[in-house]
Image: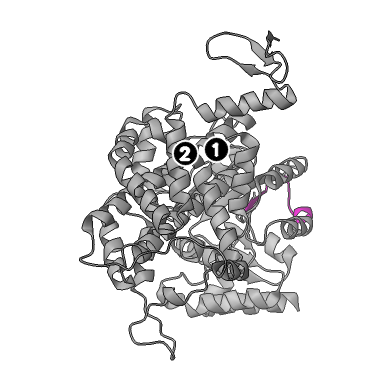
Amino acid sequence: APAARRVAAMTAAAPSSAAAAATATRKADIGLIGLAVMGQNLAFNVASRGIPISVYNRSVAKTEETVQRYAAELATGLPEGGLTGYAELPEFVASLKTPRKVVLLVKAGAPVDATLAALVPLLEEGDMVVDGGNEFYTNTARRTEELKAKGIRFVGMGVSGGEEGARFGPSLMPGGEKSAYEELEPILKAIAAQVDDGPCVTHIGPGGAGNYVKMVHNGIEYGDMQLIGETYDFLRNVAGFETAELAEIFAEWNKGDLDSFLIEITTKIMATEDDHPSAAPGSSLVDKVLDKSGSKGTGMWTIEEAARRGVPAPTIAAALDARYISAAKPERLAAAAVLAGPAPPEPSGPLDAELVEDVRRALYAAKICSYAQGMNLIRKAAADFGWDTIDLGAIAKIWKGGCIIRAKFLDRIRAAYERDPQLASLLVDPGFAADLERCGDAWRRVVVRAFTTGVPVPAFAASLAYYDAYRTDVLKSSQLVQAQRDFFGAHTYKRLDKDGVYHTRWSSDGVSEKH
């Protein structure tokens, strides 16, 4: 029965008898386990590059669905016989060239461990397993060591770009052993997004480095999305623009410094009308979307890691908090009836082109802060874990295509780290520092206007506070906080004007002692 199901699947993928016979005897270059939409699309991407692939799913019905979909899409240019489905895991493993390369696209956590428990006994020394899910990096590091003891090479690989990216070219962030990457490299370069300076893939570093970088990518994504959301809120409620007008504004912005995937899709969202039968003609769909933003954990992981490493990431933290407060919809409805505050004024007179330009500049400046925070976190983790191969310029390069945060100014980020690989922060790169100075007054006007009109802009405000704190040579607030710590807990302090560590008897005679 298993063999019959396997042959049926192969025949569905390659209708002609000659192609089916060839597929039956040919070994696949790579295999993939996990055939939800992301898995199917990545498998089709591989096959479309002329790379034979075997696929397997715990549910045979999902494997059959994948093979049938592949057969239906042959007319789009997929090669006949390029994908073969298997109903049984041993047959799937036996269909692969050695050393075997198996990609997992299953739910992170326990499902990955369960899949490995079934798969690994069927593999041989030198084979490799690539986990392409959104896995926490410590799980990847653990699995790397566990499988290394069995002679199996394990690669944790971040995959960004969503369903469309998986199908036509994602940004790929593989970690693990360099030898495994070198063997995977021809396939990964073929399926990755392609930009003007090459494919969007590079070896990130050992162990869980690939998953770590993907986690931070998602954290930056949180910040970027929240900033754009706050921009929309401000322009809608303070400036009084309608969504059709905003579609034109965002489209224009996408031609300049803000050129990015997220601005591009925002333009399309602004232009999309509600097609529900009950909707008024010309009404905007985004106005009907429930204001509860979901999250799947990678933003939370990023902030947990930032706290663990002592790296400030207030833009990303504000974005995560904004999602949490949006999810408290019933509480907000009740609070709206109780809590007082300013309401956005009714717009009057001609729309203010200068205000729109202020918002554009504020968005650009705050966006720099979000990327700077993410890059600083990656750099600190690399130092903590000894990931000496981490290259921030190369990471910026592979984020230029395929991924959600792809943006024009990643070219400039890459150039900044190529000029100075030890750059302390993007904020002090001469080019970005000049941009921040140029945008500073506009940024402040937007935040003040939002505060005085009651429009919440937590990510804009957190970014501005981060910038101001980072450029301040003496933080008076920190001086007082450390003195308070010494007062109630004898935590000691250092002085600006003298060497050594001191404790003061603040509540008694005020005498300071050098420790």
Q: Residue furthest left?
A: 350
> Does residue 123 show up magenta in the picture?
yes
Question: Which corner quadrant holds the C terminus?
Answer: top right
Relative vertical location of residue 267 with respect to residue 415 in this rendering, above or below: below
Relative vertical location of residue 221 with respect to residue 289 in this rendering, above or below: above
- Residue at 60% x, 70% y is 334
Q: Residue furthest bottom?
A: 277
Residue 467, image quadrant: top left
Mark 1–mark 2 CB contact (< 8 Å): yes
Q: Are there few (<14), some (14-19), or many (20+) residues within 10 Å of tag 2?
A: some
Q: Amino acid at mark 1?
A: Pro
Q: Amino acid at mark 2?
A: Tyr
- Residue at 32% x, 53% y is 359
Q: Is residue 28 left or right of residue 363?
A: right
Q: Are there few (<14), some (14-19), or many (20+) residues within 10 Å of tag 1?
A: some
Which one is in front, 120 or 400?
A: 400
Mark 1 lies on a secondary structure that is loop
Where is residue 503? Give x, y as percent.
69, 15
Where is residue 472? Give x, y as percent.
44, 28
Is any part of residue 255 visible from this angle? Answer: no
Where is residue 146? Give x, y as percent.
77, 43
- Residue at 23% x, 64% y is 351
> Does residue 297 show up magenta in the picture?
no
- Look at the image and give the residue range highlighted in magenta: 120-131
The mark found on residue 466 in the picture is: 2
- Residue at 60% x, 78% y is 65
The mark found on residue 312 in the picture is: 1
Q: Is residue 235 left or right of residue 482?
A: left
The mark found on residue 437 in the picture is: none
